[in-house]
Image: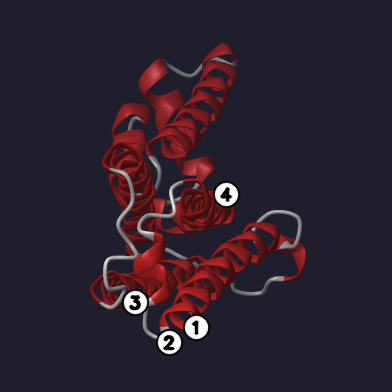
Amino acid sequence: MRIDDYVAELDRALAGPHGPKRDLVVEARDSLTDTADALEAEGLDRAEAERAAVAEFGEIAEVAPGYQSELTAVAGRRLGFLLFISVPITTLMWSVMWRVYPGDADAWRHAPVWFVAVARLLDILQLCVGLYGGLALFALSRGARWIRRPRLVTRSLGVLVWAMLPVTGALGVVLTLGANGASRLDALPALLANMVTSAFWGMQIYGATRCLRVSRSRLVRR
């Protein structure tokens, strides 16, 4: 097998974030090219030198699992960082919104007794998600030496996001419908806050989906 064919097959075998995946494939190509150049300098023709370099590098089935494990960890680190940053920002943003644009003060006095408790529960759940994202980020970076199955950490992040999405969505709906008008903010600030929240949710869902996909790959070392 020539270098171009080998690299193309390796690229098809791997799944993960585009940038890191491209870097790994380029690294593999460079290593193969350097080996082939050295063999060619020793007297082999180019085609034979490339085939020898590929044989020395290893079969795709042997090489790809290590690369795939790294891509899986990268996907987990990206989602962990996103959760660690975006969830507290979202929670803080809405807390500030309620203080600066409190809506109808009279409506707040007539809000159900459970309203504040549910609002606090939602905040706590969101902050726990952000904290777990930070812990996962640490586990997949500095703590990687102590983690025996980083694939499970990456997968747990994807599961957490998808599991919490309906929970936080349902609590948000309950708060909106049960606030007796107290949850009405000024139109422009509310629109901007919802746009930021939706953007973060979209990125989280995308990252969670990718984490579930790459951690399910048959190449990932258990």
Residue 146 in the image, given as x and y percentages of width and height: 76, 70
Q: Secondary structure at mark 1?
A: helix
Specify whether 161 is left or right of 78: left
Give the vertical position of 49 relative to 154 (above or below).
above
Q: Secondary structure at mark 2?
A: loop
Q: Give the residue type at disc 4.
A: Ile
Q: Give the residue type at disc 1.
A: Ala
The residue under label 2 is 114
Label 4 vs label 1: CA separation? 25 Å
Image quadrant where residue 184 sits: bottom left
Label 2 vs label 3: CA separation? 12 Å
Q: Give the residue type at disc 2.
A: Trp
Give the vertical position of 137 relative to 10 (above or below).
below
Sooner in the amino-acid sequence: mark 4 or mark 3: 4
Report if the CB atoms under discs 4 and 2 are less than 8 Å apart: no
The residue under label 3 is 171
The residue under label 4 is 85
Sooner in the amino-acid sequence: mark 4 or mark 1: 4
